[in-house]
Image (cartoon, helix red, strand yellow):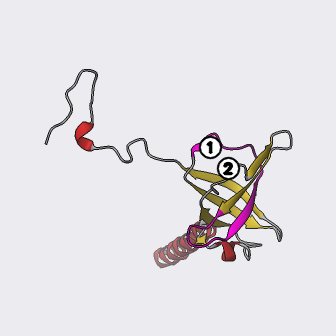
């Protein structure tokens, strides 16, 4: 009887571990290139890119809750049309990079989620010029 409980416990533990790992694996969204994103018709993937210099390459249809934009590959001159089912993210105008998570529908990338990379307010600052609280002196080396 004691041996049966141990075997049942081990089988249950292995089963729960297998189910947990399977669910975790299904939730992973790998980063892919633009070419690989165009082949991801059934699997959710993440694609990273920059916004074109011409910021007029996007438009938002707030009534239909659709946001369309283009991403360009930092490695090549390839571009990817992205449609997001939602409104334009508030940080989109200041974004230096974009990550779109979704699938390819045969014509364009259908994003379920958009992540924006915004410039750091500390980027390019000299750390010796940092002033903490009001009236503090700058840090000197």
Circles 1 and 2 in contact, beta carbons < 8 Å: yes
In the rendered structure, the answer to whether residue 40 lies left or right of residue 29 reads right
Q: Which residue is mark 2?
A: 55
Residue at 59% x, 59% y: name it: 50
Q: Which quadrant, please, contains the C terminus?
A: top left
Q: Which residues are magenta?
A: 72-94
In the rendered structure, the answer to whether residue 73 lies left or right of residue 84 reads left
Where 48 falls versus 127 (above or below)?
below
Residue at 81% x, 40% y: name it: 62
Residue at 60% x, 73% y: name it: 76
**94 or 36, nearer to the observer:** 94
Which secondary structure, mark 1?
Answer: helix
Q: Position of residue 100 (x, y in %)?
A: 65, 59
Query: 10 Å neighbourhood of mark 1: few (<14), some, or many (≥20)?
Result: few
Q: Residue furthest right?
A: 64
Marker disc for residue 93: 1
Where 49 falls versus 91 (above or below)?
below
Where 25 falls versus 94 (above or below)?
below
Q: Position of residue 126 (x, y in %)?
A: 28, 44
Q: Position of residue 138 (x, y in %)?
A: 21, 32
In the rendered structure, the answer to whether residue 55 lies left or right of residue 134 reads right
Where 110 falls versus 67 (above or below)?
below
Q: Residue furthest left?
A: 141
């Amino acid at each position: 009887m004691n041996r049966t409980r141990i075997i049942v416990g081990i089988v249950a533990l292995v089963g729960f571990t297998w189910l947990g790992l399977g669910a975790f694996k299904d939730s992973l969204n790998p980063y892919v290139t633009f070419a690989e994103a165009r082949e991801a018709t059934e699997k959710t993937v993440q694609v990273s890119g920059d916004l074109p210099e011409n910021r007029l390459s996007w438009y938002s249809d707030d009534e239909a809750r659709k946001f369309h934009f283009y991403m360009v590959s930092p490695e090549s001159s390839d571009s990817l049309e992205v449609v997001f089912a939602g409104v334009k993210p508030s940080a989109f105008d200041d974004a230096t990079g974009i990550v779109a998570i979704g699938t390819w529908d045969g014509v364009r990338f259908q994003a379920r989620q958009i992540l924006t990379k915004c410039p750091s307010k500390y980027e390019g600052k000299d750390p010796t010029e940092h002033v903490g609280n009001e009236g503090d002196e700058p840090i000197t080396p």
